[in-house]
Image: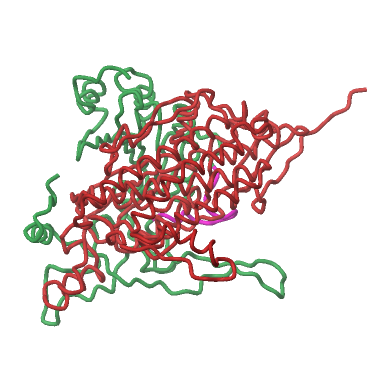
Amino acid sequence: MSEPHPTSLAERLVARFGDTLVISTVRNEVTAELAAADLIAVATALRDEPAFRFSELIDLCGIDYLGYGQTEWDTETVSGTGFSRGVEGQAQGRFNWAGRPRDTDLPRRYAAVVQLLSIEHNCRLRLRVFCEDDSLPVVPSLTQVWPGVNWFEREAFDLYGIIFEGHPDLRRILTDYGFVGHPFRKDFPLIGNVEVRYDPELKRVIYEPVSIEPRVLVPRTIRDDVDLMQAKAEAADHWREN
Amino acid sequence: MAQEIQNYTMNFGPQHPAAHGVLRLVLEMDGETIVRADPHVGLLHRGTEKLAESKPFNQSIGYMDRLDYVSMMCNEHAYVKAIETLLGIEAPERAQYIRTMFDEITRILNHLMWIGSSALDLGAMAVFLYAFREREELMDVYEAVSGARMHATYYRPGGVYRDLPDRMSKYRESPWHKGKDLKRVNSWREGSMLDFIDAFTADFPSKVDEYEDLLTTNRIWKQRTVGIGVVSPELAQQWSMTGPMLRGSGVEWDLRKKQPYAKYAEVDFDIPVGVNGDCYDRYLVRVEEMRQSNRIIRQCVNWLRANPGPVMVKNFKVAPPSRVEMKEDMEALIHHFKLFTEGYCVPAGETYSAVEAPKGEFGCYLVSDGANKPFRLHMRAPGFAHLSSMDTIVRGHMLADAVAMIGTYDLVFGDVDR
C-alpha cells in the first residue's frame, strides 16, 4: 500500500482532468460524468496513473432514465372526490407492448454506469457516460482497458440495447436465444411479449403472445421531505443528514 | 502423407452434474485439450432487477435470497445497506452484530456447499455428505430466526426482522432419531439459539479438520487441483475478480477489513491469502475462511449474550409498530397500514453498496428518484464476473480441468443469471 494521498480523490480528479469530468461527491461516493468521446482516454489514465490506479473494474450496468421522477399518484392536491386513485400511469408493470409509452423524447435516455475500485488506494469511483443518441445508443467499449468488462457490456447491450463500439463479441448474454427487444428498457412491458410452453400435439416447445394482463398493486408515489422530517421528529433518527 | 485434423465442438451442460446448475459450455476441443470455451449463461435469468422496479422497496428483499441461493443473507445485506445509505438511517448496534453473525453463518453455509459439491465434481463423494451434516444444523439456525431454512428475508432496512429466539426447535422421536441418538442430537438444543450456536462453533473446527483429513493431503484431490487454473494477481484484477478468487492469487483484499461495514471493524479475524493462485490455493483459502468465520461468530455470540437491546430502528416510516401499539394507538395503525401498502419513499440519489459475500464482492447499485419503488436496481454478482474469465483461464487445459475450474469459481446460477 502506498502513502495515502494528501488530497481527496475528487480533488485529484479535478486537478488531473479538469473540465473533462463533472464530479459530484455525495456520502463519500465520488461520481464522475463524462462524454463518451473521452471515455477511453480517461479510463486508461485512471487505470495506469499512480494517483488513481483503478486496477479493477467492479461493475458496469446500463440505465434508462425514461420516466425518472414521474409518479402515478398525486399526493399533494386533493379534489372534492379525494386524492387521485393512483391506478393510471406508465411506470413499470402498467402496460403491455401495445400500450407502451411512445412519448419517449427525453434528452439522453441511456447511460452506462461503471464502478471502479482501486485496491492500492482503497477507494471507489463511479463513472457515468450518457449515450448521445437515443435511437442508437453508442458508448465506446472498455474491453481494451479492463478485459473483465466484456460480459458486463454484453449484459448492458442485451438488456438496454446500448452498443459498445469496439467490443469483440457483442452478443446477447442473459436472454433467450432469438429474443427480440431489450427487456430492461422502461418502455418494455414487465409481463414480456411472449410465453413459452410445450405443445403435446406439435411435440415441440412453442412461443405464443403473452396471455397475462399487466397489473400493479402499489402505485408509484413520490413524497417530499415533509414525511421524512416527520419521521425524524418521531424517532430522532439520523434522517437525511447526508 | 499429412492428415488434416479438425477441432470439434462439444456441448457441456446445461444438464450436467458438474455444471452446478444451468451452465451451458460450448467447448472447442483439440483432442482432450480446450482451445476455446464459450459459456452460455442466462438460463436462470428471472429479471430480478426489473421486477424490483415494480415493487415497493421492502417487497424485493425476498428476491435477494433467491439470487445467490447459497449465501442468502449476504445478498440481503447488500440490498438493505444500499437502502439504509439512501435513507440515511443506521441499524441499532445489536442488529449490526446479528447481521455480522449471520453473514458469517452464511459464509460457512456457502463454503460447506462449495467444498461438498466441488469435491464431488472431482471424485470425492464423502465430503459432500459430511458437509451437508453441518449445513443442516446451520439451516436450523436460519429457520429458528426467520421461519425459513434458506430464503430468510430476515434483514430489513433499519435492522433485522426480529430478535434472536429463546429456544431452538428439537428433533422429535422418529424411526431415524430415537433413544440415545435422539438425546445426542437434541443436547445442543436445550437452551437458546445463542447456546446452540455456541455449541456448534465449539465443535465446528474439529469438523473442518475432518474435511481437511479427506482432502488437504489427498493425492487425487491434489492431482486435480494443484497447478490447475492458475490466476496471477494481475489477471485476477483485470478480470474483475473479488473474494477468494482474488485472495487465492495472493492479493490481500477483503471488504470486511478494508471497507468495514456492520461490526466487522470490532471483531478480530484474519484474511487468508494464497500463494500460487491455483485451484488448490483457493481451496485452502476457503477452508481457512470457514475457521475465521467460526471465530467471528463466537465473538458475536459473546457480545449478543451480554448486550440485549433493540434490533430495529424505532421509526415507523420504515419499521412496523408492535401489535400492542397498533391496537392502542391510531397513529401506529396508520403507520402500519401505510408501510404495508405504500411502503416508504427513499430520497432521490444513487449509491453503490458492497458486501464481502462468500463468493466475492456482492454489490448493489441503487438509483432512487424519490419514489416508494427503486428506479434502477443493479446487483453486481461475483459469479458473473468470475465466469467471464473462463475462456482466458481454461484455454490449453484438459477437459477435466474445466470441471475443476467451474468448481473453484464457486458458481451458483441464481447469482450469475439474476
Q: Is residue B412 magenta?
A: no
Chain B visual colour: red
Relative to residue B247, is residue B181 drawn left or right? right
- Asked which quadrant contains residue B144, the reply is bottom left
- x, y percentage for residue B10? 73, 43
- Would you identify the image quadrant in which residue A62 lies? top left
Residue most extreme to the left: A233
Which segment is the magenta one?
A171-185
For residue B208, above or below residue B89: above
The residue sitting at 34% across, 26% down in the picture is A42
Question: Where does residue A69 sit, x and y in percent of width and height?
Answer: 23, 56
Residue A102 can be seen in this image: no
Considering only vertical position in the picture, is A229 above or below B292? below
Which chain comes out green in the rendered image?
A
Asked whether the viewer can see residue B41, the reply is: yes
Is residue A182 on the magenta stretch?
Answer: yes
Chief secondary structure of the magenta portion: loop
Residue B322 vs residue B134, the one in the foreground = B134
